[in-house]
Image: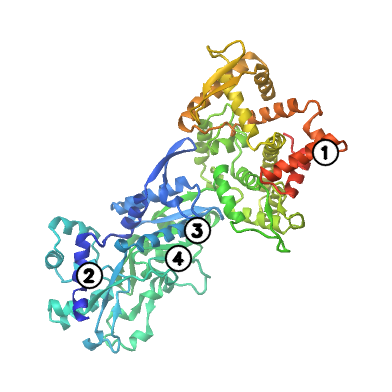
Amino acid sequence: MTAQKNNSLRQHLTAVKAGERVFENAFQGISRMILEQGFEKVVVNAKTTYDFNIFRTGRKHTIGMYDEINSFVSFVKDAAEGGSSKEMAFVLVGEPGNGKTFFVEFLCAQYRNFLARERNRKYSFRFLNMDKLGTYGKIREIDSQTYEDPMILAMNFYDSVEENRRFLAEQGGFTEDELDLLYRNYRPLGACSGYIWNDIRQHADNNLEAMLDQLAVIPVPMSESLGTLTGKYPAKDKITSSAVDLLGEESIQRLLHITDTNNPYRFDLRRGALARVAGGGIHFSDEIFKNKKDLVQVYLGVIQNRAIEIDGYKWPIDSMIIATSNNSEFNRFLAEKEEAPIVDRCRICYVSHNTNYRMQEGLTSYAIGSDSKTTLTKETLHQDPNLNYAASVGVVLTRLPRSEKLTPIETMKLAAGEVAGEKSIKALAEVIDALGQEPDITKRFGQRGLGHRSLGRSIQILKESSDTNEGRCMVAYDIFKALERVVLDYVVDTNERAKYLEDLKTGKKLYRERIMTEMFNAYMDEPMAIRKDVQNYVNMIIGIDAENLGPDRMWKYKDPQTGELRALKIDERYVKSVEERIGLKTEEQRASFRTSIRKIYGQKISVDPNYDFMDNLELVKAVTDVRLKSDIAGAGSLIGALANRTNEENQKLYDRMIVTMLGKLGYCRTCAQKTIEYFCTQEDES
């Protein structure tokens, strides 16, 4: 056993030299963890940015947050390369419920998984047989209080740097260049480790083997509940919180054993949150500016000096400090000018709400929950296939600021990278840049709106309603009533409340258009009927001027999705009807519209062969209207046929559509009937 302990530090040095273990600081570890998994280039709001794969893995991962993640990665990378970031804290500031805390906790979970791998494990050291020294009473073993790496001890083995470099070269086999690299992460031993090691050195009379005999290298405990390696410090109440929670305090139990009153080991640092993450961990301070002033001032020293200081004693720490704060709390803090130094030591990153309604569908599914739902009577609760879309569109519209250049729907489409008529993505980029100049953060793009918690509340309200429980279905249209209730109950500002209610009306119009498409698909007895008709229109306007078009108006083309040769009959009457529905009266207008569609086709199909133009709401609506009106001219209209079921033909049509909706489109009887009922009313007609 003694031989094992005797070689423990030597073994560690050999393992580091061989690359079986790593010696790096917290920033280098986090940077390596993120970059190892790779990244992809994506275009968001007309700007090229990077999407890091590590944040997109796992059952419940972060969605969106591109700018924020990019800021964070460049901050960590700069600190890992010895830049100014290593003396700063990273602070996420934003509205409640936009994912700040979730992001940090996700990062901490990933870091713990990363450190759990054998090569990445963090190690510390333990002093053995301390009772033999005489001044430590019955204390037999002492761990490094700040989980210092054994390499730090090796770099401080003797008093002089030359002796330490020689020791590392002899015991670990490190070359001069490798030593230079190691010494970039050099820091002195903490006050108590240094003091104890000095005692051991004197007791062993500088005998190397005797000194090594009193050392053991131990892995840092990984238990999340201990707060080691990743620790969260929440803002506590003003009376009980003190610097002790962060730094530690004098331990009466230790004073009963230690006879030497100068010994810094009398301070118990593990009582504080910082010492537990000081060995290459992440310290997460939730709502940092909600803490009382004296505690924020403790952070001032910790962030800049990266050390725990008590009564003149210092313990250098190696940890990344990341914090969150509420907009209002942060603004209140900024208003007190004397607090400027702490903000100066922070890299402030303003977190906006998610403004991409396509991505919001992922966040909405988190809010709805993945488990199967039941009613109060334990019967299965069905989910309307349009529920996610309706909820996502509703909340995203509230997050989009009003602009003279773009309508709310155009802003929403462009923010999701979709087509918005004639408006280009540059228009959105200009709006975002103009709003970015606002000194009031809350007026910037995506900073105000209904957050994730408000969405969660609306889903709770929807589930508890008697209509949902009686019908055994969460009907999509009802989510708008629930969102309105949340706005009325939780939004305090009058102007904001009025804007959000107006946005929800816009959301209902979009839901209405979605239902028109769904009804057409149900009528045609095919889930993708409208998609095919939209693609037919696009293919017709591409082939309408083709040279190989015969008198039968048949045009042969290659399907970009399958690569097969297909034939299509060009129906000019259909093309004109669609264009009239869009509101294109003159030949010039039609030619301009067709050119824009062909241009989109050329740009999109080369990148994504499955692109289907279904994001072009204007075109989809026009095709739906034309098909609905032309197909059921005999029955007056589909609405008339479904609303008046007194004759047998209409009843048959209604029954057939219900069967299609149940069998092919994912509806249950309740939401199928309610959707048809809503379709037959004139509500929310744009």
The residue nearer to you, when weighing 477 against 49, is 477
Q: For the residue marked with disc 4, what is the amino acid?
A: Lys
Cα–Cα gap, marks 3 and 4: 10 Å
Check if mark 4's residue and mark 2's residue have beta carbons within 8 Å: no
Q: Position of residue 664 (x, y in %)?
A: 66, 42
Q: Position of residue 132 (x, y in %)?
A: 22, 88
Q: In this rendering, would 580 be left or right of 680?
A: left
Cα–Cα gap, marks 4 and 1: 62 Å
Precedes in sequence: disc 3 or disc 1: 3
Camera-near label (4 vs 1) is: 1
Visible residue check, residue 648: yes
Residue at 67% across / 41% down in the picture?
507
The residue carrying pointer 3 sits among few (fewer than 14), some (14 to 19) or many (20 or more) residues within 10 Å by Cα, namely some
Q: In this rendering, would 262 be left or right of 452?
A: left
Q: In this rendering, would 133 be left or right of 390?
A: left
Check if mark 2's residue and mark 3's residue have beta carbons within 8 Å: no
Reading the image, the residue beneath label 1 is 651
Reading the image, the residue beneath label 4 is 232
Reading the image, the residue beneath label 3 is 101
Q: What mark, if any, has residue 153 been given in the picture?
A: 2
Visible residue check, residue 338: no
| Residue 308 against residue 41 in the figure, above or below | below
Q: For the residue marked with disc 2, what is the amino acid?
A: Leu
Q: Quadrant of residue 592?
A: top right
Give the SS element for disc 2: helix
Q: For the residue marked with disc 3, what is the amino acid?
A: Thr
Check if mark 3's residue and mark 1's residue have beta carbons within 8 Å: no
The residue carrying pointer 2 sits among few (fewer than 14), some (14 to 19) or many (20 or more) residues within 10 Å by Cα, namely many
Precedes in sequence: disc 2 or disc 3: 3
Give the SS element for disc 3: helix
Q: Position of residue 37 (x, y in %)?
A: 37, 50
